[in-house]
Amino acid sequence: MVQLAVENVDRVLDDNNGQKINVLEDINLNVGSGEFISIIGPSGCGKTTLLRLISGLDTPEKGRVEVDGNVIDQPDVSRGYVFQHGSLFPWETIKDNISSGLKATNGRNYDKKLVDHYIELMGLKGFENAYPHQVSGGMAQRAALARSIVLNPELLLLDEPMGALDAFTRADVQDVIQRVWKQTKTTMILVTHDIDEAIYLGTRIVVMTPRPGRIKEIVDNPLEFPRKRTSDEFLQFRRQIQDKLNF
């Protein structure tokens, strides 16, 4: 069943000199419930802009974006968003950061056991009372992921959440995201510059062109789980995606 529909979307932005920039052009994308979509393409091709349109943080000049048949025109808790740097509240503990959205929607009656469950799931047990500056970048990103997923969103948008992490930590957070996706069945859309990351996580890979960003091709990922980054099948599929990114 189609959960998200992006239909004939264009997005035009103004640069600092008042010139119009065609960021996205004629974007069409259908996403089914429970899919994991990886969006990959060169810098400036509009990947993050597309994510912002899906979240409701931005609106298109042309076309429409719908979730479950309803046009998106503003942000909603049913669509979680994880940024590259997590954006945790520095004055709150890890546990308070994770529970902040629940507190905002449910007041003091939020489900504390649910927060504890995600602290455990994210490997943050023992650090729940630490502040963001006291934990590693990987832990902070896991906390940011937990803060979004604890609200049980229908759609989780991941805007290069591993982009600032070292290779080892990046792989660890990828595994956490994959585990959460499998357990929760939440539809996820990831923007990334990393081909390996796109392949490791995505059930389909959306390849975008340089600006103005268009969808060049949508590729089904044939690799079964669990995926091994060093397998012959993985490396062969990686070469296929790399070839599609050579414009």
Image: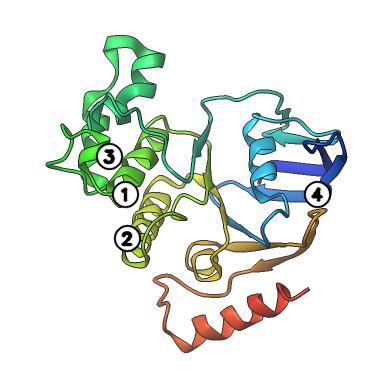
User: Total number of numbered labels?
Assistant: 4
Residue on which the image places disc 2: 169
Label 3 or label 2, whichever comes before in sequence order: 3
Q: Are marks 3 and 2 in contact (CB under 8 Å)?
A: no
Residue at 42%, 35% in the rendered image? 87
The amino acid type of the residue labelled 2 equals Thr
Label 3 or label 4, whichever comes before in sequence order: 4
Residue on which the image places disc 4: 27
The amino acid type of the residue labelled 1 equals Gly
Mark 3 vs mark 1, foreground winner is 1
Q: Answer with left or right where residue 227 lies relative to residue 119.
A: right
Q: Answer with left or right where residue 232 lies relative to residue 18.
A: left
The amino acid type of the residue labelled 4 equals Ile
Image quarter where the C terminus lies is bottom right
Q: Secondary structure at mark 2?
A: helix
Residue on which the image places disc 1: 137
- Label 1 vs label 4: CA separation? 34 Å
Q: Is residue 138 visible?
A: yes
Label 4 or label 2, whichever comes before in sequence order: 4
- Label 4 vs label 2: CA separation? 33 Å
Residue at 53%, 65% in the rendered image? 194
Residue at 63%, 49% in the rendered image? 32
- Is disc 3 surrounded by few (<14), some (14 to 19) or many (20+) residues within 10 Å? many
